[in-house]
Amino acid sequence: MEETMEPDKIWDCIVVGAGIEGSNTARYSASLGKKTLCLEQFPLPHSRGSSHGQSRITRHSYDKKYYADMMPEAFALWEQIERMAKEKLFINCGCLTIDSPPYTSINHVRDNLTSNGIKTEPVSNKELKEKYRLNFPSGHQGLLEPTGGMLLASKCLAAVQNQFVKFGGVLQDNEKVTDIVPGDIIHVKTNKGLYKTRKLILTPGPWASSLLRPLGIDLQLKPIRTSALYWKVKQSGFTAEENYPCVIDHTPDCVNIFNGTIYSLPCYEYPGMIKICLHNGPAINPDARDDVDYSWVEKNTSEYVRRYVMGVEGKPSITEHCIYTVSPDDDCTLDRHPKFDNIVIGVGFSGSGFKISPVVGKILFQLAFGLQPNYDMAPFKIARFQKSRIKSVL
């Protein structure tokens, strides 16, 4: 262990959590020559957090402008990571946003993309049926972003971690942080030893609250168990090679009737199966994730598929699971600790953090080392939670 070999070593930066946010943060830090240690509580690779699985949607198509503004840099950084990895990490199949009158979501998406120079294409209700096999009510319309697509998630995570190590970083898994003692030099205690660092960046995913509360912060984060559902298709036309895009249903009816946004990715992970999921699930304790009833997730998604998706069986053939950490306002927190400015927090990505993680990593590094990010950070401040409990910490 590093501390045993060099008991007086002081790291420039320690990152806690080696999911996609922490790994990209560590990679960025090491790429700039900082002595960086990344600690992961579980043996790698694992499927216990939010960064496993084979596919994630990536897109410029956000209706919140502060996320849309991050995406051009995110795409560029993912391209850089892909080029360095010398393997394919992104499939450009497009992303189709669905909305209904008064079309608030796709109007915001179109405006945001236009301001960033990203082209979109309107998709009529007739085209939704004939081209994409989506049998929506007559008022539903679509907006296609041709630049969107799928990130190959597990390959992305492995590539980022490998590049972190190549840049000189140290990645230590199966090592859980048990205590943090703030100060000019921060002491980080694990189940294996003690480390010292000038900067500490916390990206612990679903385990955020257990690390933040002893530091006097409660962001009222809620880990939820989500289900990745795979459905057999009954005809051709659902693959990325056949120009079938990722689809996100942002209609108010979808949220009101099915208790969340529904999204899909073309056939890729399992031959002849499309991935269709509900962006919601039951609240859980991440250390007892199976002790919940999640049957309603499959029930609601199945009803949606039977109503609206033609050419797909009405019951999923394969179910996998993931954990998202949801914040009260669905926005992540990227901020310095209010009392200790050499401790930086990146949590609460609410199921939308994978695609922006290279930018998140850069921002968290900048916050830790006293640099000014290029983005409006107001939406991500701890102070936005009026009811958050921030206690005095000795």
Image (spheres, rainbow, N blue to C red):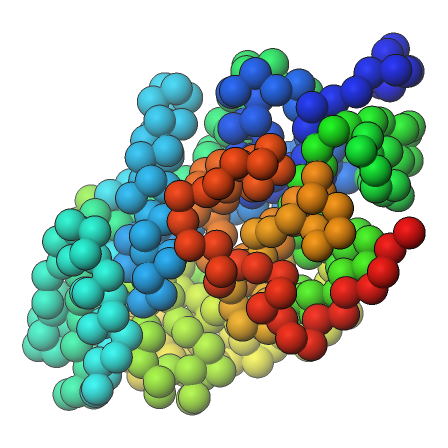
Q: Nearer the viewer, residue 228 or 72?
A: 72
Q: Quadrant of residue 137?
A: bottom left
Q: Is residue 252 above or below residue 342?
A: below
Q: Looking at the image, which residue is at 57% across and 80% down?
A: 296
Q: Is residue 167 above or below residue 329?
A: above
Q: Looking at the image, which residue is at 19% across and 56% down?
A: 115
In percent of width and height, residue 324 lies at 59, 60
Q: Looking at the image, which residue is at 42% across and 54% down?
A: 376
In percent of width and height, residue 127 lies at 9, 71
Q: Is residue 337 above or below residue 261?
A: above
Q: Looking at the image, which residue is at 49% across and 60% down?
A: 378
Instruction: Say which quadrant the N terminus sits in.
Output: top right
Residue 267 visible: no
Residue 343 visible: yes
Seen as rendered, the residue at the extreme top is 5
Q: Nearer the viewer, residue 189 or 151?
A: 189
In percent of width and height, residue 47 lies at 64, 46
Q: Is residue 278 left or right of residue 241?
A: right
Q: Is residue 173 left or right of residue 234?
A: right
Q: Quadrant of residue 221?
A: bottom right
Q: How many marks?
A: 0
Q: Is residue 249 left or right of residue 81?
A: left
In percent of width and height, residue 31 lies at 51, 20
Q: Nearer the viewer, residue 329 or 89?
A: 329
Q: Is residue 328 left or right of residue 192?
A: left
